[in-house]
Image (tube, rainbow, N blue to C red):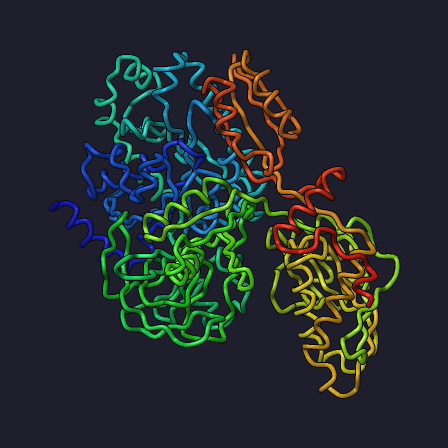
Amino acid sequence: MGRREDNIREAQKLMDKPELIRNIGIAAHIDHGKTTLSDNLIAGAGMMSEELAGKQLLLDFDEQEQARGITINAANASMVHEYEGKKSLINLIDTPGHVDFGGDVTRAMRAVDGCVIVCCAVEGVMPQTETVVRQALREKVKPTLFINKVDRLINELKVTPEDMMARFGKIIKHVNDLIQKMVPEEFGSEWFVKPEEGTVVFGSAYHNWAISIPYMKEKGVTFKDIYEHLNNGTQKELAKVAPLHNILLNMIIKHLPNPVVAQKYRIPHIWHGDRDSDIGKAMTTCDPNSDPVLMVTKIIIDPHAGEIASGSLFAGTIKRGQELTVLGMPGINRTQAVSVSVGPDRITVDKAIAGNIIAVAGLKNAIAGSTVSVDPEMESFEKIVHISEPVVTVAVEAKHMKDLPKLVECLRMLAKADPSLRVEINNETGEHLLSGMGELHLEITEYRIDHEHGIEINTSEPIVVYRETIMNSSVRAFEGKSPNKHNRFYFRVSLLPQDVIDAIKKGEIPMDAKIKEPKKLAKQLTEMGMAPEDVKHVFTIHGANIFSNCTKGIQYLFETKELLIDSFKEAVDKGPRSWEPVEGMLVRLMDAKLHEDNIHRGPGQVIPAARSGIYGSMVEAGTTLLEPKQKLFVSVPQDLMGAVNSQLNTRRCTIEDMPMERDQVTIIAKAPVSELFGFAASIRGATQGKALWTTEFAGFDPIPRELLDNVTKEIRTRKGLKPDPPTADYYAA
């Protein structure tokens, strides 16, 4: 235990020296060895037994993670490593690889400055590898590469040294191709991973050895020596010659930036406030003497300490007992404890300065994505944009009525801890709807409600979350009348260009924010193909839909603007066809007639009138449903290709490609989420368990016309609505 305690003391000293801190993420496709690698780094730093490293999986401390052998939650750990005579503090976040938990990766990338992309030498670059590279570069996080499981190439595939080198070259080229597509302009080829510079490491996390080209030159070791060790089964000796933690932590310290360097280019990217203000300068320079600014990236629910907010401290110092504000939330929060994490343990510290990843107890109003400061007027950080969306829903109910209040509180806490979960509580029907990224995501959540929170529940069969949109532009302005007939609004709707929809979803065009720079937004939208008259006066952007004011000189319109925005949000949150969210629509307010007395144009008059006008215009334009799709990657021996294809054909899949390598074929297909329930069991049965498969979110596509009416009726009946959607006349009444 002595070495561990020494390391904790060293870590506490180094927390005050941001130039000696590295905040990094470990990210990869599922089963490529992230958690095993993290274990070995922690063991090398003296935080756990080296014998158990790679077997204990210290950062998979959740009961379900251990049972399933996968990482579900991003876990933090801090360690100390000496390089070139200087000790550095490395704050590491081990992230999940399963597509259902990709939201944790996105949030972790906001907290770190650099990352190690782990890639299996046998499987190569997989779909989730591509996704994590994209997630890192989107947050301006510098990548390095660790090619893991090199021992399997020789022990299982029996490759020659030449084949091994060719395979490494292919993986490095693939990763650099991905980086080239998405790298921030100012870094270009500087951020490519280059073996000769030492930003690529080769090794085996399980057997605790690694090698880089600079280390080989320094120690006189060659790839041939490594090949001999693996061939002769002497990996323990290899681990002594080239210990994994040494090589990898050296790479991290030498090639990944410290917060002082990284925040100069990351802050302008993730915070769009005034950079010349005191707080703007403090964050850009990682100043510990300013007011504190914390970006919360994770909420941990601790059974003893309650809610713990974990995140990156970009400026200032946070101490115990300090009063802080969660921006956008009422009241002041008092910090109860400040700590750093080592797997499941939190080490309490008196204070933490800018540049550290910390955990703070007492910020009861915080959620993942919150900005915490002392100034309630401070500009918030940019919203964290997730790559995939919740597409599968289950209805949850308590088995015993006495547990209902407990269930409501439990769902609220789960949604707070995991923003990828969406919880909707229907107070009229008493139904609790839980939406997640996939079947596994919901399965884990149900297990937690039952086993960790002790609430017995019944759940429905999984339901798919659809989107609504329009098929054409409306040909005339549709009139919406207020109940008192004193106010009238005239709307037209049309489809947004796909470029605009994509830009909103990626966060390049901000949603749900006050339009701060209307001229800049208008220019951006015009460049993407929208008409100048449609972008001159944008009221708001919500859920990949734009609301634009195309009226001229309407008296009292400004006074009803906020009510009109509320009406628009209500209309696009629940579309007229099946009360599913709407996306990809431009709503234009063409004209309005308003009563001169404001008592006759209150919320009860304006909101129903505007909502009916938008609904009526949508129905006249023709509405349809968009169904969520997933990209499927199924790898099987060639002789089982027919069995896989017949499975895919029964599930409305579109096969896009079938690359072959030796006797393995990878079938790449696009499949509707609604057809993938039970796919795991079917594909295992059809291929005698020889298929390896993975999925990634592939957006929403229009549902086939022949299925539209039946699916609409199913959704409406489930929601307690009349089976057939209303006609335009219903909204004109």
* Position in image of residue 212 (x %, y %): 35, 30
Q: Quadrant of residue 541?
A: bottom right
* Position in image of residue 495 (x %, y %): 77, 52
Q: Is residue 252 visible?
A: yes
Q: Residue at x 45, y 63 (%)?
A: 370
Q: Residue at x 61, y 60 (%)?
A: 510
Does 298 appear above or below 630?
below
Q: Is residue 314 visible?
A: no
Q: How many marks?
A: 0
Is 200 displayed left or right of 539 in the figure? left
Does 324 appear above or below 164?
below
Q: Residue at x 23, y 65 (%)?
A: 350
| Residue sitting nearer the eye, 527 or 507 | 507
Is 264 displayed left or right of 564 in the figure? left
Residue at the extreme left: 2
* Position in image of residue 9 (x %, y %): 18, 54
Does 148 appear above or below 284?
above
Please state, as top left, top right, bottom left or bottom right, where the N terminus lies in the image: top left
| Residue sitting nearer the eye, 198 or 310 | 310
| Residue sitting nearer the eye, 117 or 265 | 117
Q: Quadrant of residue 209?
A: top left
Q: Residue at x 55, y 18 (%)?
A: 665
* Position in image of residue 592 (x %, y %): 82, 74
Please state, as top left, top right, bottom left or bottom right, where the C terminus lies in the image: bottom right
